[in-house]
Image (cartoon, rainbow, N blue to C red):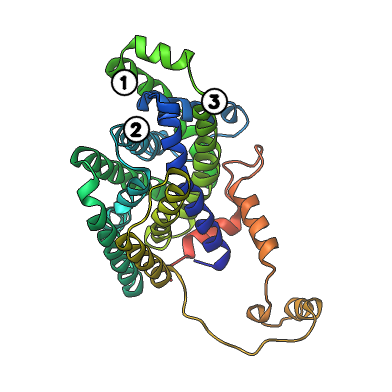
Amino acid sequence: MNPRHSALALLVAVLWGVNFVAIDLGLHPDGAEMPPLLFVAMRFTLVVLPCIFFIRKPEVGWKAIIGVGLFMSAGQFGLLYLAMALGMPAGLASLVLQAQVLLTVLLAAGFLGERPSRRQFAGVVLGVAGLAVVAVGRSLVAPVLPLMIVLAAALSWAAGNIVARKAKAASGLGLVVWSGAVVPLPLLGLSLLVDGPAAVSQALLEVQPVTLVSALYTAIFGSLVGYGIWNRLLGLYPSSAVVPFTLLVPVVGMTTAWLVLGEVPTPAEVTGGLLLLAGVATAVLRPWKFRRRDSRPRAQRRGEVRAGGRPEDVAGDLAGDLAGDLAAAFPPAEDAGRLRPEDATRGAGTRAD
Protein backbone atom coordinates (compact mmCIF):
# COMPACT_ATOMS: atom_id res chain seq x y z
CA MET A 1 0.00 0.00 0.00
CA ASN A 2 1.41 3.41 -0.94
CA PRO A 3 2.03 6.12 1.72
CA ARG A 4 -1.00 8.17 0.75
CA HIS A 5 -3.45 5.32 1.22
CA SER A 6 -1.61 4.26 4.38
CA ALA A 7 -2.25 7.74 5.81
CA LEU A 8 -5.95 7.44 4.98
CA ALA A 9 -6.09 4.01 6.63
CA LEU A 10 -4.45 5.53 9.73
CA LEU A 11 -7.11 8.27 9.80
CA VAL A 12 -9.81 5.61 9.73
CA ALA A 13 -8.19 3.85 12.69
CA VAL A 14 -8.31 7.06 14.74
CA LEU A 15 -11.93 7.79 13.85
CA TRP A 16 -12.99 4.26 14.72
CA GLY A 17 -11.02 4.25 17.97
CA VAL A 18 -12.84 7.36 19.22
CA ASN A 19 -16.09 5.82 17.99
CA PHE A 20 -16.25 3.37 20.91
CA VAL A 21 -16.31 6.12 23.52
CA ALA A 22 -18.94 7.99 21.51
CA ILE A 23 -21.09 4.84 21.46
CA ASP A 24 -20.68 4.32 25.22
CA LEU A 25 -21.68 7.90 25.98
CA GLY A 26 -24.73 7.61 23.74
CA LEU A 27 -25.85 4.32 25.24
CA HIS A 28 -25.62 5.56 28.84
CA PRO A 29 -26.64 9.25 28.82
CA ASP A 30 -26.64 10.65 32.38
CA GLY A 31 -27.38 7.26 33.90
CA ALA A 32 -30.24 6.46 31.52
CA GLU A 33 -30.26 3.55 29.09
CA MET A 34 -30.77 3.82 25.33
CA PRO A 35 -32.06 0.62 23.65
CA PRO A 36 -28.99 -0.55 21.68
CA LEU A 37 -30.74 -1.82 18.55
CA LEU A 38 -32.81 1.36 18.34
CA PHE A 39 -29.59 3.37 18.68
CA VAL A 40 -28.06 1.51 15.72
CA ALA A 41 -31.21 2.16 13.68
CA MET A 42 -30.90 5.89 14.52
CA ARG A 43 -27.25 5.91 13.47
CA PHE A 44 -27.90 4.41 10.05
CA THR A 45 -30.95 6.55 9.44
CA LEU A 46 -28.55 9.50 9.69
CA VAL A 47 -26.10 7.69 7.40
CA VAL A 48 -28.73 7.14 4.72
CA LEU A 49 -30.74 10.36 4.90
CA PRO A 50 -30.40 12.60 3.00
CA CYS A 51 -27.24 11.23 1.33
CA ILE A 52 -29.02 8.50 -0.60
CA PHE A 53 -30.88 11.14 -2.65
CA PHE A 54 -27.63 12.71 -3.87
CA ILE A 55 -25.29 9.73 -4.25
CA ARG A 56 -25.72 7.24 -7.05
CA LYS A 57 -26.05 3.55 -6.37
CA PRO A 58 -22.58 1.98 -6.71
CA GLU A 59 -22.05 -0.18 -9.77
CA VAL A 60 -22.23 -3.44 -7.85
CA GLY A 61 -24.99 -6.02 -7.57
CA TRP A 62 -27.77 -5.84 -5.03
CA LYS A 63 -26.42 -9.00 -3.38
CA ALA A 64 -23.19 -7.14 -2.54
CA ILE A 65 -25.08 -4.12 -1.22
CA ILE A 66 -27.34 -6.26 0.94
CA GLY A 67 -24.39 -8.41 2.09
CA VAL A 68 -22.35 -5.41 3.22
CA GLY A 69 -25.41 -3.94 4.92
CA LEU A 70 -26.23 -7.13 6.80
CA PHE A 71 -22.70 -8.13 7.82
CA MET A 72 -20.59 -4.97 8.07
CA SER A 73 -23.37 -2.69 9.35
CA ALA A 74 -26.38 -4.43 10.91
CA GLY A 75 -24.57 -7.51 12.21
CA GLN A 76 -21.40 -5.87 13.45
CA PHE A 77 -22.96 -2.84 15.11
CA GLY A 78 -26.13 -4.50 16.31
CA LEU A 79 -24.03 -7.04 18.22
CA LEU A 80 -21.43 -4.48 19.36
CA TYR A 81 -24.02 -2.03 20.74
CA LEU A 82 -25.83 -4.90 22.46
CA ALA A 83 -22.61 -6.07 24.14
CA MET A 84 -21.75 -2.56 25.33
CA ALA A 85 -25.27 -2.07 26.65
CA LEU A 86 -24.77 -5.29 28.64
CA GLY A 87 -21.63 -3.91 30.28
CA MET A 88 -18.72 -4.41 27.89
CA PRO A 89 -16.21 -1.58 28.60
CA ALA A 90 -15.56 0.70 25.62
CA GLY A 91 -11.78 0.20 25.66
CA LEU A 92 -12.01 -3.56 25.91
CA ALA A 93 -14.66 -3.66 23.19
CA SER A 94 -12.31 -1.79 20.83
CA LEU A 95 -9.73 -4.49 21.54
CA VAL A 96 -11.82 -7.65 21.26
CA LEU A 97 -13.50 -6.49 18.05
CA GLN A 98 -10.08 -6.57 16.37
CA ALA A 99 -10.32 -10.35 16.29
CA GLN A 100 -11.81 -9.55 12.88
CA VAL A 101 -8.26 -8.99 11.60
CA LEU A 102 -7.33 -12.65 11.78
CA LEU A 103 -10.83 -13.73 10.77
CA THR A 104 -10.73 -11.51 7.67
CA VAL A 105 -7.33 -12.83 6.56
CA LEU A 106 -8.55 -16.41 7.01
CA LEU A 107 -11.82 -15.78 5.17
CA ALA A 108 -9.99 -13.96 2.37
CA ALA A 109 -7.64 -16.90 1.96
CA GLY A 110 -10.54 -19.32 1.83
CA PHE A 111 -13.02 -17.38 -0.31
CA LEU A 112 -10.89 -14.98 -2.37
CA GLY A 113 -7.66 -16.95 -2.72
CA GLU A 114 -5.61 -14.06 -1.25
CA ARG A 115 -2.43 -15.31 0.38
CA PRO A 116 -0.65 -12.84 2.68
CA SER A 117 3.10 -12.45 2.32
CA ARG A 118 5.37 -13.79 5.04
CA ARG A 119 5.99 -10.29 6.35
CA GLN A 120 2.28 -9.49 6.46
CA PHE A 121 1.54 -12.78 8.15
CA ALA A 122 4.26 -12.12 10.73
CA GLY A 123 2.79 -8.67 11.36
CA VAL A 124 -0.69 -10.08 11.89
CA VAL A 125 0.68 -12.75 14.26
CA LEU A 126 2.56 -10.09 16.24
CA GLY A 127 -0.55 -7.91 16.36
CA VAL A 128 -2.71 -10.80 17.53
CA ALA A 129 -0.11 -11.54 20.23
CA GLY A 130 -0.54 -7.96 21.41
CA LEU A 131 -4.30 -8.42 21.48
CA ALA A 132 -3.85 -11.58 23.54
CA VAL A 133 -1.65 -9.77 26.07
CA VAL A 134 -4.23 -7.03 26.57
CA ALA A 135 -7.12 -9.51 26.65
CA VAL A 136 -5.46 -11.55 29.39
CA GLY A 137 -4.91 -8.39 31.40
CA ARG A 138 -8.62 -7.49 31.21
CA SER A 139 -10.31 -10.91 31.07
CA LEU A 140 -10.96 -11.04 34.81
CA VAL A 141 -13.12 -7.90 34.72
CA ALA A 142 -15.08 -8.64 31.52
CA PRO A 143 -18.38 -10.55 31.65
CA VAL A 144 -18.35 -13.66 29.49
CA LEU A 145 -21.59 -13.02 27.56
CA PRO A 146 -20.70 -9.51 26.30
CA LEU A 147 -17.25 -10.80 25.35
CA MET A 148 -18.76 -13.57 23.21
CA ILE A 149 -21.18 -11.13 21.60
CA VAL A 150 -18.30 -8.84 20.58
CA LEU A 151 -16.48 -11.83 19.07
CA ALA A 152 -19.63 -12.56 17.05
CA ALA A 153 -19.58 -8.91 15.92
CA ALA A 154 -15.96 -9.39 14.84
CA LEU A 155 -16.95 -12.37 12.69
CA SER A 156 -19.76 -10.34 11.10
CA TRP A 157 -17.32 -7.50 10.31
CA ALA A 158 -14.87 -9.99 8.75
CA ALA A 159 -17.62 -11.38 6.52
CA GLY A 160 -18.56 -7.84 5.49
CA ASN A 161 -14.92 -7.12 4.61
CA ILE A 162 -14.92 -10.09 2.25
CA VAL A 163 -18.15 -9.01 0.55
CA ALA A 164 -16.86 -5.44 0.12
CA ARG A 165 -13.50 -6.66 -1.18
CA LYS A 166 -15.17 -8.94 -3.72
CA ALA A 167 -17.55 -6.19 -4.86
CA LYS A 168 -14.69 -3.70 -5.54
CA ALA A 169 -17.04 -0.73 -5.66
CA ALA A 170 -15.58 2.36 -7.33
CA SER A 171 -17.39 4.59 -4.81
CA GLY A 172 -16.72 3.55 -1.21
CA LEU A 173 -19.06 6.28 0.04
CA GLY A 174 -21.83 5.09 -2.27
CA LEU A 175 -21.51 1.56 -0.92
CA VAL A 176 -21.71 2.82 2.67
CA VAL A 177 -24.84 4.86 2.05
CA TRP A 178 -26.75 2.35 -0.06
CA SER A 179 -25.83 -0.64 2.11
CA GLY A 180 -26.79 1.39 5.18
CA ALA A 181 -30.36 1.47 3.92
CA VAL A 182 -30.55 -2.22 4.83
CA VAL A 183 -30.14 -1.46 8.55
CA PRO A 184 -32.81 0.87 10.06
CA LEU A 185 -36.08 -0.99 9.51
CA PRO A 186 -34.90 -4.51 10.52
CA LEU A 187 -33.16 -3.25 13.68
CA LEU A 188 -36.08 -1.02 14.58
CA GLY A 189 -38.31 -4.07 14.26
CA LEU A 190 -35.95 -6.12 16.45
CA SER A 191 -35.87 -3.33 19.03
CA LEU A 192 -39.67 -3.24 19.14
CA LEU A 193 -39.67 -7.01 19.59
CA VAL A 194 -36.92 -7.16 22.23
CA ASP A 195 -37.42 -3.90 24.16
CA GLY A 196 -41.15 -3.40 23.57
CA PRO A 197 -43.05 -0.53 21.92
CA ALA A 198 -43.35 1.36 25.22
CA ALA A 199 -39.58 1.43 25.83
CA VAL A 200 -38.85 2.43 22.22
CA SER A 201 -41.42 5.24 22.31
CA GLN A 202 -40.12 6.55 25.63
CA ALA A 203 -36.51 6.47 24.41
CA LEU A 204 -37.40 8.46 21.30
CA LEU A 205 -39.47 11.02 23.20
CA GLU A 206 -36.85 11.50 25.93
CA VAL A 207 -33.70 11.21 23.83
CA GLN A 208 -30.78 13.03 25.46
CA PRO A 209 -28.55 15.58 23.65
CA VAL A 210 -25.45 13.43 24.26
CA THR A 211 -27.18 10.53 22.49
CA LEU A 212 -27.95 12.73 19.49
CA VAL A 213 -24.35 13.99 19.33
CA SER A 214 -23.10 10.42 19.61
CA ALA A 215 -25.39 9.30 16.79
CA LEU A 216 -24.16 12.16 14.59
CA TYR A 217 -20.50 11.38 15.26
CA THR A 218 -20.88 7.68 14.59
CA ALA A 219 -22.93 8.32 11.45
CA ILE A 220 -20.71 11.00 9.91
CA PHE A 221 -17.20 10.11 11.05
CA GLY A 222 -17.60 6.43 11.89
CA SER A 223 -19.66 5.41 8.87
CA LEU A 224 -19.63 8.01 6.08
CA VAL A 225 -16.00 9.09 6.38
CA GLY A 226 -14.52 5.94 7.95
CA TYR A 227 -16.23 3.27 5.87
CA GLY A 228 -16.19 5.45 2.77
CA ILE A 229 -12.39 5.36 2.85
CA TRP A 230 -12.28 1.76 4.11
CA ASN A 231 -14.41 0.30 1.33
CA ARG A 232 -12.43 2.29 -1.22
CA LEU A 233 -9.16 0.79 0.03
CA LEU A 234 -10.63 -2.72 0.07
CA GLY A 235 -11.54 -2.20 -3.57
CA LEU A 236 -7.92 -1.33 -4.45
CA TYR A 237 -5.84 -3.68 -2.28
CA PRO A 238 -5.96 -7.25 -0.94
CA SER A 239 -7.61 -7.56 2.48
CA SER A 240 -4.31 -8.66 4.06
CA ALA A 241 -2.76 -5.28 3.15
CA VAL A 242 -5.65 -3.11 4.44
CA VAL A 243 -7.01 -4.93 7.47
CA PRO A 244 -3.85 -4.83 9.68
CA PHE A 245 -4.34 -1.06 10.11
CA THR A 246 -7.32 -1.80 12.33
CA LEU A 247 -4.87 -3.12 14.92
CA LEU A 248 -4.37 0.54 15.81
CA VAL A 249 -8.05 0.97 16.67
CA PRO A 250 -7.82 -0.53 20.20
CA VAL A 251 -4.80 1.64 20.99
CA VAL A 252 -6.80 4.76 20.12
CA GLY A 253 -9.96 3.38 21.71
CA MET A 254 -8.35 2.44 25.01
CA THR A 255 -6.48 5.75 25.21
CA THR A 256 -9.69 7.70 24.55
CA ALA A 257 -11.60 5.60 27.08
CA TRP A 258 -8.87 6.36 29.64
CA LEU A 259 -9.06 10.11 29.02
CA VAL A 260 -12.86 10.43 28.78
CA LEU A 261 -14.31 7.53 30.79
CA GLY A 262 -11.52 7.01 33.31
CA GLU A 263 -10.68 3.47 32.13
CA VAL A 264 -7.02 3.43 33.25
CA PRO A 265 -4.81 1.14 31.11
CA THR A 266 -2.95 -1.59 32.97
CA PRO A 267 0.71 -2.48 32.27
CA ALA A 268 -0.54 -5.44 30.23
CA GLU A 269 -2.64 -3.10 28.07
CA VAL A 270 0.32 -0.80 27.46
CA THR A 271 2.55 -3.73 26.55
CA GLY A 272 -0.10 -5.17 24.25
CA GLY A 273 -0.60 -1.78 22.61
CA LEU A 274 3.12 -1.55 21.78
CA LEU A 275 2.99 -5.02 20.24
CA LEU A 276 0.01 -3.94 18.17
CA LEU A 277 1.94 -0.99 16.80
CA ALA A 278 4.89 -3.24 16.00
CA GLY A 279 2.58 -5.67 14.24
CA VAL A 280 1.06 -2.93 12.09
CA ALA A 281 4.52 -1.63 11.15
CA THR A 282 5.70 -5.12 10.22
CA ALA A 283 2.60 -5.91 8.16
CA VAL A 284 2.05 -2.73 6.18
CA LEU A 285 5.19 -0.59 6.08
CA ARG A 286 7.92 -1.10 3.52
CA PRO A 287 11.53 -1.31 4.71
CA TRP A 288 13.22 2.09 4.66
CA LYS A 289 15.44 2.74 1.66
CA PHE A 290 17.86 5.60 2.18
CA ARG A 291 18.98 7.62 -0.82
CA ARG A 292 20.74 10.91 -1.29
CA ARG A 293 18.35 13.84 -1.23
CA ASP A 294 18.06 15.82 -4.46
CA SER A 295 18.66 19.48 -3.53
CA ARG A 296 17.32 20.93 -6.78
CA PRO A 297 14.08 22.95 -6.71
CA ARG A 298 10.91 20.86 -6.91
CA ALA A 299 9.78 22.60 -10.09
CA GLN A 300 13.04 21.61 -11.80
CA ARG A 301 12.67 18.00 -10.69
CA ARG A 302 9.08 17.87 -11.90
CA GLY A 303 10.21 19.25 -15.23
CA GLU A 304 12.73 16.43 -15.44
CA VAL A 305 9.99 13.87 -14.91
CA ARG A 306 7.91 15.37 -17.68
CA ALA A 307 10.97 15.23 -19.94
CA GLY A 308 11.52 11.55 -19.19
CA GLY A 309 13.26 11.62 -15.80
CA ARG A 310 12.65 9.10 -13.03
CA PRO A 311 9.41 9.69 -11.09
CA GLU A 312 10.82 8.00 -8.01
CA ASP A 313 13.23 10.87 -7.52
CA VAL A 314 10.40 13.33 -6.96
CA ALA A 315 9.30 13.95 -3.37
CA GLY A 316 5.50 14.29 -3.41
CA ASP A 317 3.62 16.89 -1.45
CA LEU A 318 1.78 14.91 1.29
CA ALA A 319 -0.95 17.49 1.81
CA GLY A 320 -1.74 17.53 -1.89
CA ASP A 321 -1.67 13.74 -2.06
CA LEU A 322 -4.08 13.43 0.86
CA ALA A 323 -6.42 15.97 -0.69
CA GLY A 324 -6.39 13.99 -3.92
CA ASP A 325 -7.11 10.74 -2.13
CA LEU A 326 -9.97 12.28 -0.17
CA ALA A 327 -11.43 13.56 -3.43
CA ALA A 328 -11.14 10.04 -4.87
CA ALA A 329 -12.71 8.49 -1.78
CA PHE A 330 -15.60 10.94 -1.80
CA PRO A 331 -16.48 11.73 -5.43
CA PRO A 332 -19.12 14.33 -6.33
CA ALA A 333 -22.65 12.98 -6.51
CA GLU A 334 -22.62 13.00 -10.28
CA ASP A 335 -19.41 10.90 -10.31
CA ALA A 336 -20.33 8.43 -7.56
CA GLY A 337 -20.22 4.85 -8.77
CA ARG A 338 -18.09 5.60 -11.84
CA LEU A 339 -14.84 3.69 -12.16
CA ARG A 340 -12.05 5.71 -13.74
CA PRO A 341 -9.69 3.89 -16.13
CA GLU A 342 -6.68 4.54 -13.90
CA ASP A 343 -8.54 3.12 -10.89
CA ALA A 344 -9.39 -0.02 -12.80
CA THR A 345 -5.74 -0.46 -13.77
CA ARG A 346 -4.53 0.08 -10.23
CA GLY A 347 -7.12 -2.19 -8.72
CA ALA A 348 -6.37 -5.00 -11.13
CA GLY A 349 -2.60 -4.74 -10.88
CA THR A 350 -2.16 -4.16 -7.14
CA ARG A 351 -0.37 -6.77 -5.04
CA ALA A 352 0.36 -6.95 -1.33
CA ASP A 353 3.56 -5.29 -0.25
Amino acid type at mark 2:
Gly
Q: Nearer the viewer, mark 1 or mark 3?
A: 3
To which residue does mark 3 refer? 209
Neighbours of disc 3 within 10 Å: few (<14), some (14-19), many (20+): few
Give percent across and percent down for residue 48.
52, 29
To which residue does mark 1 refer? 190
- First in sequence, mark 1 or 3: give its number: 1
- Distance of label 3 from label 2 (alpha carbons): 22 Å
Q: Quadrant of residue 144?
A: top left
Give percent across and percent down for residue 91.
37, 48
Query: In this figure, what is the number of numbered marks?
Result: 3
- Quick check: 117 above or below 75? below
- 291 relative to 210 in the view: left or right: right
- Quick check: 301 above or below 197? below
Q: Secondary structure at mark 2?
A: helix
**Quadrant of image for the C terminus:** bottom left
The residue lying at 40 percent from left, 27 percent from top is 31
The residue lying at 20 percent from left, 38 percent from top is 145
- 91 relative to 326 in the view: left or right: left
- First in sequence, mark 1 or 2: give its number: 2
